[in-house]
Amino acid sequence: MARSNPRGWIGPGLQRILDLDAGASDNVYRDRLRGLLVDASDALPADLRFLFLAALGEQSDLPFLEARLEEAGELLDRGVRALRRHLREAERLVAEHLIERHRAGSHPFAEDAWHWRNQEICLSERPDPGIVLGRTLVSLQAGLDSLVEVFTIPATPGEGAVTFTAGEGVLGVDAQGQGGSTWQVTLRVAPMRLGESRWTQLRVGLPSVDVLKPYLALAPVRRHTGARVTVDFGSPPFATTAWVLDAVLPTQLGAPRGGLEVVNLSNGPVSVPFEGPRPGFMYGLGWEWAPGRGRGPQ
């Protein structure tokens, strides 16, 4: 990705999808290509996505692919030769995804004309159970005034409504249930300039914190300078023990907490900052439910 003259090694298919002006700088080419590939990797299974992002250089500052694969192999407990085979599979799946997605001549940066940067997430059941998402919205097109997200929350019918409420930087919210536990949420914002950043907040009201899995975590799709996760466990707390999830693989969220930093629940809300969170990893807090809380084993 750091090679000079990206126009010389980006093929014609990607050139068409990127749709950049002839005068665009090398850095603009690299940034746009990186964003395109990171977004496309969302379609991969968790282990292949982690490997693909590691090879892309999103997980590490190591300059050479071989070194990045060796580092990924230590985390995945796989040899470099096996990882190369899996990487070829990940690359094929990403290519097929890009071909299918842009077959009709659609343009990714008109459809996905924004991304998040620097996220904060807070869970509390006082005064009402809910999650507040604070995020910096970055506009990738001039005049951006709305965006669509999909939320999955494991609430079941009869428990009460899941609600979405506009906060700072958001003019309004429209939420449409998609069946089961999925909502399509449209956020309306004041028109933004190309490249403009704006702090936004969205509150997700829950029927109970017990509908959640026993963790609250962020999974950045791009590198952030920082993130923060806060949980107010209440009094008495709804957990018996809690621990920090710092650069944990998605497949390890349900694993025992061995070796992770345990936090004190007796001093009020627990707030943990994370510096430079990387794509492909999870950052947040995990816990064990107090007796009578939660949904049992999850």
Image (cartoon, rainbow, N blue to C red):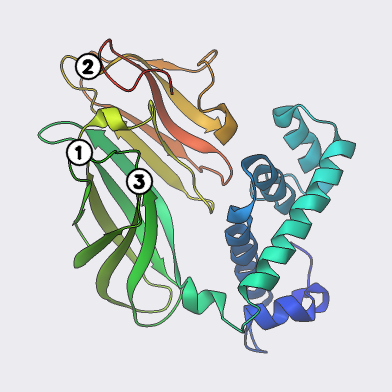
Q: Which residue is mark 3?
A: 181
Which residue is label 1 attached to?
158
Foreground pick, 293 / 21: 293
- Is residue 63 placed above or below 297 in the rendered structure? below
Q: Label 3 to label 2, Cα distance in Å? A: 26 Å
Residue 197 appears anywhere in the view = yes
Can the viewer see residue 231 in this picture?
no
Give the percent coordinates (x, y) of residue 297: 42, 18
Q: Nearer the viewer, mark 3 or mark 2?
A: 3
In the image: residue 207, left or right of residue 221: left
Residue nearest the observer in this picture, 281 or 277: 281
Q: Earlier in the sequence, mark 1 or mark 3?
A: 1
From the viewer's side, name the closer residue of 104 and 23.
Answer: 104
Residue type highlighted by circle 1: Gly
Mark 1: which secondary structure? loop
Crowdedness near tag 3: few (<14), some (14–19) or many (≥20) residues, C-alpha within 10 Å = some
- Can you tell which quarter of the image residue 267 is in? top left
Q: CA distance from mark 1 to mark 3?
A: 12 Å
Q: Which residue is mark 2?
A: 237
Q: Residue furthest right?
A: 81
Residue located farthest toward the bottom when viewing the structure as drawn: 22
